[in-house]
Amino acid sequence: MPGQQRTLTLRFLAEPADVNFGGKVHGGAVMKWIDLCAYGCAAGWSGKYCITAYVGGMHFVKPILVGSMVEVDAKVIYTGRTSMHLRIHVRAGDPKSTERELCTHCIAVMVAMDENGKPAQVPEWIPETEQDKRQHESAVKLMEMRNSIHEEMTTYLDAD
């Protein structure tokens, strides 16, 4: 039911196919995992097919080793009319332990789509806890910053 599933956690082992030339998990693999989890969370919240509109503020804090248990966690922290802002954390650790360390974090913006490929309305999320309210306010500030950056970047989009 739309508006009920606010979080999603994917768990899996980092595989040898995910390795980069330095012997750690490739950043592109981590980005794919983030996109998959963001989609699952947004689709669960909205009850609709969703597309990625933005992923930003990505920080690679610690490398992930092949063979690590990886947890990618997404949580809705803001809803617009057709979009959802999600906080994403990627944690990893020894699969024989329950301890996981933060390796990557970012914000993703997903847009719900209707059957005709047009943006569709999503259920409103209203923050309740103090942490929810802080994350909601942060999402609004980040949205304003992205708009300013977008305006500035249009200078570089002009054809030469």
Image: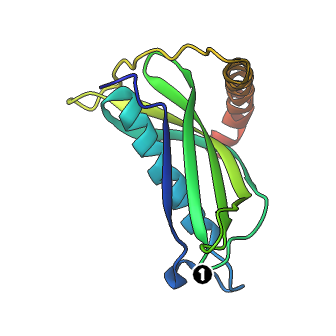
The figure's colour scheme reads: rainbow
Give the residue at x 68% y 79%. 24
Where is 66 relative to 121, above or below? Answer: below
Residue 52 is situated, as x and y percent measured from the top left of the image, at 47, 41
Give the residue at x 67% y 45%. 106
Q: Is residue 107 left or right of residue 124?
A: right
Q: How many marks?
A: 1
Residue 44 quadrant: top left
Q: Secondary structure at mark 1?
A: loop
Q: Residue furthest left?
A: 115
Q: Is residue 73 left or right of residue 117?
A: right
Q: Is residue 18 left or right of residue 51?
A: right
Residue 9 is situated, as x and y percent measured from the top left of the image, at 51, 49
Give the residue at x 46% y 14%. 124
Choose between 151 and 23: the one closer to the eye: 23
Where is 7 relative to 104, above or below? Answer: above
For the N terminus, which image quadrant?
Answer: top left
Residue 59 is situated, as x and y percent measured from the top left of the image, at 75, 53
Q: Amino acid under label 1?
A: Val
Q: Is residue 58 left or right of residue 70?
A: right
Where is 86 relative to 15, above or below? Answer: above
Question: How many residues crowd mark 1 within 10 Å: few (<14), some (14–19), many (20+)?
Answer: some
Choose between 119 and 84: the one closer to the eye: 84
The residue tagged 1 is 19
Q: Residue furthest right?
A: 61
Residue 6 is situated, as x and y percent measured from the top left of the image, at 48, 31
Choose between 115 and 68: the one closer to the eye: 68
